Amino acid sequence: MQFRSLRNPIAVILMLSMMSSSTIGMVSSFTIGGFAKPASAGAPAAVGWVSLLVGIAATFKGFTGDNKTMRSDFTHRAIEALQREKPDYNAVVVNTGVNHKVEGPSVEEDFIHLNEFTYKVYLSRKGQPFKFELNGDGGWINWAYTGHFGRQGKTLIAR
């Protein structure tokens, strides 16, 4: 399978984020900025989780609708993408404007900018526990999570 006219890196990320892992493995090459980039022979083409979420956030650039709808849609789509691409991980996506605390070793984290909002993403392989506490407003506009968690109120324990 080849994709020849994808000149925008964000378009490549979005296209790959909508494919299943098995379909991505069939990609033989794609074009970024006019240069063909062959996929490794016999190995699936992988997109990092940060790039994946940056691509999702980019789809909201210039969004003129309700901010609550945009933020809720982003957290839903981010969690769906992480479930699909990182099934062996526990993940939390949280608005940095909401006070929260994370405790535990082996937690990867990064920031994703969504127009004027910033979200932080925490990832840890299942079986490597961490504690996440939200000390503010909940709801899809501020946080979402996926994986194996115990929950009590706004406190999550990843298992």
Image: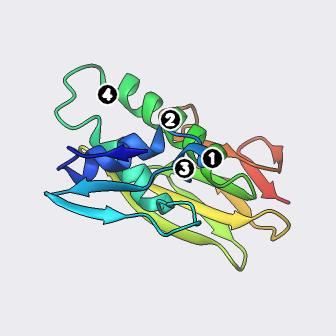
SS label for mark 4: helix
Pointer 4 local density, CA inside 10 Å: few below 14, some 14–19, many at least 20: some
Residues at discs 4 and 2 in contact (Cβ within 8 Å): no
Pointer 1 local density, CA inside 10 Å: few below 14, some 14–19, many at least 20: few
Amino acid type shown at disc 2: Arg
Q: Mark 2 and mark 3: span between their CA atoms?
A: 11 Å
Q: Which numbered marker is on residue 77?
A: 2
Q: Mark 1 and mark 3: span between their CA atoms?
A: 26 Å
The residue labelled by disc 3 is 93
Q: Which numbered marker is on residue 67?
A: 4
The residue labelled by disc 1 is 22
Pointer 3 local density, CA inside 10 Å: few below 14, some 14–19, many at least 20: many
Amino acid type shown at disc 1: Ser
Q: Which coloring applies here?
A: rainbow
Pointer 2 local density, CA inside 10 Å: few below 14, some 14–19, many at least 20: some
Residues at discs 2 and 3 in contact (Cβ within 8 Å): no
Coordinates of residue 51 in the picture (x, y in percent): 40, 58
SS label for mark 1: helix
Using residue 89 as the reference point, say whether residue 74 is left or right of it: left
Quadrant where the N terminus lies? top left
Residue at the image point whose x is 29% and y is 36% from the top: 59
Amino acid type shown at disc 4: Asn
Q: Mark 4 and mark 1: span between their CA atoms?
A: 34 Å
Residue at the image point whose x is 40% and y is 33% from the top: 71
Coordinates of residue 132 in the picture (x, y in percent): 69, 59
Q: Mark 4 and mark 2: span between their CA atoms?
A: 15 Å
Q: Quadrant of residue 57?
A: top left
Query: Earlier along the polypeptide chain: callout 1 or callout 2?
Result: 1
SS label for mark 3: strand
Query: Earlier along the polypeptide chain: callout 4 or callout 1?
Result: 1
Residues at discs 4 and 1 in contact (Cβ within 8 Å): no
